[in-house]
Amino acid sequence: MFARHCVQRRDTLWRQAAIAAGRYTRFNNGLTHQYRALSATTTNPPKTIFSGIQPTGVPHLGNYLGALQQWVKLQNESSPDTTLIYSLVDLHAITIRQDPALLRQWKKESLAMLLAIGLDPKRSIVFHQSDVPAHTELMWILSCQASTGYLGRMTQWKDKTANEKDGGEKLKLGLFSYPVLQAADVLVHGATHVPVGHDQAQHLEFARQIANGFNENYGKDVLLAPETLISPAKRIMSLTDPSTKMSKSHPNPKSRILLTDSDDAIRSKIKSAVTDSFDGITYQPDRRPGVSNLLDIFFHSGEAVETDDQVALAKHLEGLNLKAVKEEVAMAVIEVVRPIRERYENIVQDQKMLDRVAEEGKEKARRSAEMVLGRVRKAVGLF
Ligand code: AQP
């Protein structure tokens, strides 16, 4: 009875939030098997999808296959009453010192890139995180609940502090506490589902725990613990060091394929990707990380590949040598990147349109965040 009551209450809250944000746009599309769970029937409450990307440079193939591609898929395949909110998380970007002029430029370019990959600002709310102060206000309130012990055990924090020799003098508070901001990003919009790459799964678990802890403390169903949607392309690895993930900030530009790379650049980066000297083509991520990463990239890069999984793909490529496999992989990646790059080159020139999209996104995202923040303020006694 109690559970049923909660479901109905959430249903109403989601609907109210969706109406407040003007989310009942008509949208027409079929659903793939993978995200069938997200199709709202008349009996299910509407879903809210939220995700973000840091504007710290041109997104790479790992960002695309691990996250952005899913954002577009969700946009195109979700039921009409699903709300989609995608943020350029510039406040996360400054947890590491950024050149202000460069950050400004990256913000603009990243917005253009989100449109180039296929996000439609009429259907999805696309906005800069710092345009919506509710994110930071909720972060502060949640910071007063968050355990420093839990934050200190986060893998990314431990990785970043592992080699620290001067007692943490150089480590900044923002880098330690950004999972709280990430939790606020998601919770303030009442997100039900968060599509991310595997590296973000632990942070999402933290967001769920903080939401449940908050609700326990305040005895109310104020925050909603979201589900994590891990993309099928969980973790695309660096081309030069396949033991680490492909990343925007890696010092070696050959380690990643950018969504703005030319066909030749893609061919050359894949050609020089680190592999091994074992015979044949096999999918063994532990033993053959480089070759397996190329198979992952190939498998997730195209509908042309008609195999069930990467092991089957390796079998399919059995007769080829590594050079020929790299050429195949490069062709598949070029097919993915080329149309995005071409759209991007046009969109990034249109400053007026980009300003308008950012402004509209800001207004919609502010409205979307109002309801949860209002409930939280009331729950903790701020009004
Ligand atoms: N290599 C990857 N494979 C699969 N998914 C990935 N993601 C990032 N790298 C990979 C997913 O992309 C989304 C946006 O990531 P982000 O920009 O917010 O931050 P990040 O995870 O720190 O990405 P980078 O590219 O490595 O940036 P830097 O170098 O600036 O830290 C997330 O959903 C992430 O999971």
Image (cartoon, helix red, strand yellow):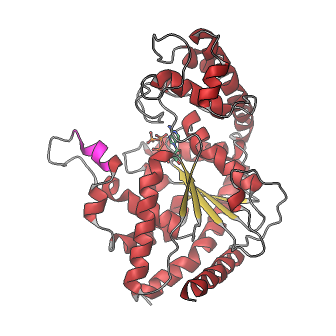
Residue 356 seen: no
* Residue 158 drawn in magenta: yes
Q: Is residue 109 left or right of residue 181?
A: right
Nearest the viewer among 364 and 282 is 282
Q: Which is more toward the observer, 350 or 198?
A: 198
Q: Which residues are magenta?
A: 157-163
- Residue 237 visible within the image: yes
Residue at 14% in and 43% down: 166
Q: At which x and y percent is residue 90? A: 49, 53
Residue 181, quarter of the rendered image: bottom left
In the rendered view, would you say 49 is above or below 294? Answer: below
Q: Quadrant of the C terminus?
A: bottom left
**Measured from the top left, where is residue 38 in percent x and y?**
69, 61
Q: Is residue 98 above or below residue 189?
A: above
Tell me the residue at 69%/20% (across/down): 331
Residue 94 x/y as whole percent: 41, 50
Q: Residue at x 71, y 42 (%)?
A: 116
Judge from the rendering whether residue 352 lies leftward or rightward of residue 101; answer left or right: right
- Is 4 above or below relative to 160? below
Q: Main secondary structure of the magenta part?
A: helix
* Quadrant where the N terminus is found in the figure: bottom right
Examine the image and state in which quarter residue 358 appears: bottom right
Write the residue at 76% across / 59% down. 122
Magenta stretch containing residue 307, yes or no? no
